[in-house]
Structure formats: structure tokens, C-alpha cells
Amino acid sequence: MAEHTQVAVALVKVLEFSGRWFMFIRSEAWSLRRSMQSGGVNTIGEMADLTHNFGMFAGNASKALAGDELAKKTALADIESHIAVFEKAKGNLPQRAGDLEQGIAALKELGHSLEAL
């Protein structure tokens, strides 16, 4: 039961980050587009797609809590790909590096708690 609580707490942190990240993308779309043109994360669409995908973590994590191994593997793979994109984004968005680090930490925590199931 403790593992289930850890997954739930980690998932809340990820969803909290995703909400803040979505509002940032929405409010800064034009300046983000310009700052990302230099490489790494090339489009605002890629970052917005990631934000949209955070909702999938909730579904896959809840299925993993119920014992669905495929959902668990999918969630873990999605977490790794999101972390990689956010790592690249830190170079293009140094003013948001702190937020990105929080998001990466939340994703890693979710990954570790899912692995412990």
C-alpha cells in the first residue's frame, strides 16, 4: 500500500508541474518560438505536445496501480522521453531551468515509484 501512496504523491507533483508548464507555454508562445529556433527543442508544438501528454501519465499510472504491466512499461518509457526533451529545453530556456528541473525531478520520482510496484 505504501508503494501506491508513493505513486499517487509523485503523480500529483507531475500534474502540478504540467499545469504550471502549460500556463507558461500559453503565455509565452511567441517568445518561446523565437528562443527555441536555435536548436534542441525546435517548435512550440513539441513542448505543447508534451504538456498534453502529461494527462496520459495519470491514466497509465492508475492502470499500473491496478497491476497492468503494459501501462507501467508505457508510463516508464514516456517518462524517459519527456525527461530527455526537458533536458534539451533547459539549454534553450535558461530562464525556466528551475521549473524544468522541478518537472524532471517529479518525473523521475514518478518513474522510481512505478518501478517499485
Image (cartoon, rainbow, N blue to C red):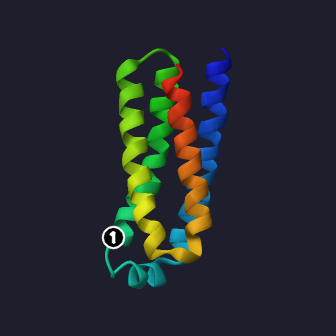
* Residue at left offset 52%, top offset 78%: 28
| Local crowd size for mark 1, using a 10 Å CA cut-off: few (<14), some (14–19), many (≥20) | some
* Residue 13, image quadrant: top right
Report x, y in % for residue 95: 58, 76
Give the mark count: 1
* Residue at left offset 53%, top offset 22%: 116
* Front in this rendered view, residue 59 or 6: 6
Q: In this image, 15 relative to 87: left or right? A: right
Q: In this image, 57 relative to 12: left or right? A: left
Q: Amino acid at mark 1?
A: Gly
* Residue at left offset 47%, top offset 56%: 51
Q: In this image, 106 relative to 47: left or right? A: right
* Residue 23, image quadrant: bottom right
Report x, y in % for residue 52: 44, 53
Report x, y in % for residue 70: 34, 23
* Residue at left offset 44%, top offset 51%: 83
* Front in this rendered view, residue 114 or 21: 114
Q: In this image, 26 relative to 20: left or right? A: left
- Quadrant occupied by the N terminus: top right
Question: Which residue bears the numbered disc 1?
Answer: 40
Q: Relative to residue 110, is residue 72 depicted above or below?
A: above
The secondary element bearing badge 1 is classed as: loop
Q: Relative to residue 92, is residue 72 depicted above or below?
A: above
* Residue 49, image quadrant: bottom left
